[in-house]
Image (tube, rainbow, N blue to C red):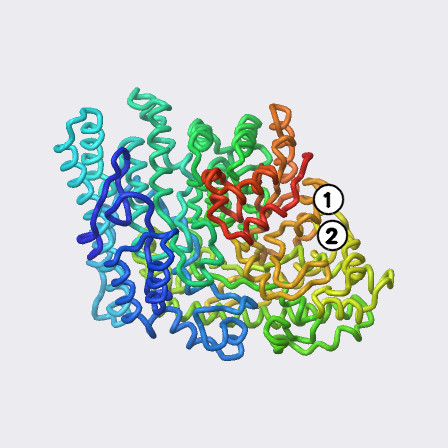
Amino acid sequence: LHIAKNIPLHIEEDTLLAGRCDGKSGRHGIIFPELEGGFLDRVADAFEKENDVYELSAADAASMREMAEYWRGKTLLDRLYAAIPPDTRRLIFKDGDYYGQKYIITQTASTRSSLQWVPDYGKVINRGFAALRDAAQARLDTLDLLDSEIALNEEPFLRALIMSCDAMILFAHRYADLAANMAARTSEPKRRAELERMARTLRRVPEFPARDFYEAVQAHWIFQCFSRLEQRTSSVISNGRLDQLFYPFYVADKKAGTLTDDDALEILENLWLNIANYINISVSPQAKAFYEGHAHWEAVTIGGKLPDGRDATNELTYLILQSKRAVPLNYPDLAARIHSLSPQPYLMEVAETIKEGSGFPKIFNDEEIIPLYLQKNVPLEVANDYSASGCSEVRLPNWDTCLTPHPWLNLGSVLEMTLNNGRLHYFDNQRFGLETGDARDFKSFDQLFEAFKKQLYHMLTRAFVLVRCVEKTRAENLATPLFSLLHDKAFEQCKDLHSNAIKGGASVGFYDLIGLGTVLDSLAAIKKLVFEEEKLTMAQVCDALDANFEGFDTVRALLGTAPKYGNNDPYVDSIGYELEKAAVEFSHKYRTGNDTELDVRYVPVTSHIPLGKVVWATPNGRLAGTYLSEGSSASHGADTCGPTAVLLSNAHTKYLGLPERAARLLNIKLSPAAIAGVAGSRKLTQFLRTFCDLKLWHLQFNVINRETMLKAQKEPEHYRNLLVRVAGYSAYFVDLSPSLQDEIIDRTEQTEV
């Protein structure tokens, strides 16, 4: 409420939609000192010295130093570090510097307030904050304040909701005043009319229900904008299913003759521009490594199914796809849901948009995601209505209750500990894992794989301990009344979403396994060349790895001949199946302290780059310190049998016996020539239907030539607008680090579909 009263406001010169998180023009971001703010003085020093990326005023630098002094010792990171047992802490943080991490088990809970989230925008647009405030006040008026539990918990919760409603309404009204003042000073008639409409609209929404398409979009945007001021929601607050949310207003306005498709496109494109003006500023060392290219991904979900199971595509679905092709921005992050009955014209439009080469849309598969939700006891009509969020995650706005940021588990380190008796070369051969024996003495692949599973279970145990500490610490230090207000179960139970105490719904989190392809190729190489063909001994392999292959070129070349993941080869895919089975069975057996289910996931963002830096040479021929494979994609250059083989390997490595599975991020890079013309679009739609039939979770494309990216590396000034797909988001190629640029260049370019 204090921020709503005092934050400077600004309306861009030509925008049709009001709402920013600062009072200046251009791109901007927010610092959240309560998370890791104790080192912001160092950040201010660095920003002042290296201002080629960010502009930092002297006043802002002084504020950051003041915040660092205030928050040092009191941040979420400080309290989380103290709560984690020493044996688990040792696997996470650098010695003597808890602002840095070892990247063995990586905690992400202090870089953000919560996981990605999709609020119930329907309440914002169709009910309005006046009605939501009245509901909270009515609930407050009925409380028995002589009940100590209610007085301590429910009363302050409801008062916080009421204050949040007041803040949202005040924020919009202040923007209405600004728009009216600008209109009075504007001599140009068209712009004056736009500003007057903006002022009228903001006096109504989001306080009261929207009445037309423009009001609905403005209500959506100003709430989304304002919500960022409450907390850092991962890197994103997603947009939800906009082709469903705005469709009734679109139809009514078209019927009334007050809206044309060109009008709707202009309004939507203003929404995309407003989103693009917000930048996710990652200031901690690990956050900068994880979210390269100013990553944030406000997913707009289109297509899919209606709650009753019918196909959901409509005229607005196609209009949003058209808009995405027309506007060369990396926002919004467009997510297209598909299912077995998705119309062919819709898939053709999706294909045409993919061919633009910006990495949009990413594809989500109803045939995988909805059945998994049903196994988690989610009602069918709720599961049918899921929204994409984050890189490749999905959310049920009034059903999901878990906001706890998850850990990343370095599979490369697990493999190295298996081959090095629990020790890691990068850390001077310190022991972090179990002593499972000298790998040189292993007599069979089964013995090796059993040792690998022991190391994996040891790391998973520590990861689960970490999550329990995170849940407790976050519940004691964070609150989100604005999002809790919009969540049915949180409101009904008068419990904040950060409390981890909401009953019912789906309390489902996850942890990520990083480096899947690297590890599968490595295990397959040892199995084939050591224990089956006996062309190498375990001693030769271990000696070559210890030397980072220096002087062992022949050994490295032999290892490179082994079967590779991503080629529909049962030999290596079966190892992947057993690996996932081991992880899923662990997740099925154990829950966190709040009975939260932690599912197995393969979504690295860009963490496979820094995590690879601490992993020594691996038996697939990878050199020490280089990047790991990303997501559920094949190792770079290993998938030589075409993109359909990549899909089949993904399908064959899934363990379907238990439901503790979540997103598999899959990147495929296509040559533009492979899908050129109408024939190419048809081939791409057939490929999408194959993906759908195989019941895979997620798929996204880079459609770009290697030569283009090499030129962009040499002449970045000529390629400022070159968009590439990174992980679950797209970014400008020249904004990425050289190591990440190289990683994208090295992904296999498929020349046939």
Q: Is residue 670 above or below residue 81?
A: above
The residue identified by callout 1 is: 640
Disc number for residue 564: 2
Give the mark, 2 or 1, whose residue is nearer the N terminus: 2
Q: In the image, which disc is placed on residue 74?
A: none
> Whole-percent x and y of residue 25?
27, 43
Rendered position, 726 above or below 580: above
Neighbourhood count class around disc 1 (C-alpha, 10 Å): few under 14, some 14–19, many 20 upward: some
Kind of residue at disc 1: Thr
Q: Dots 2 and 1: beta carbons under 8 Å?
A: yes
- Disc 1 secondary structure class: loop
Q: Is residue 307 visible?
A: no
Foreground: 216 or 329?
329
Q: How far apart are marks 2 and 1 (CA)?
A: 9 Å
Specify whether residue 33 is in view: yes
Foreground residue, 265 or 100?
Answer: 100
Which quarter of the rendered picture does the N terminus lie within?
bottom left
Answer with left or right where residue 136 lies relative to residue 97: left
Is residue 676 positioned above or below 66 on the image? above
Is 278 left, or right, of 699 in this rendering? left
Location of the C terminus by quadrant is top right
Query: Residue 741: horizontal and vertical position, in percent?
Result: 55, 49
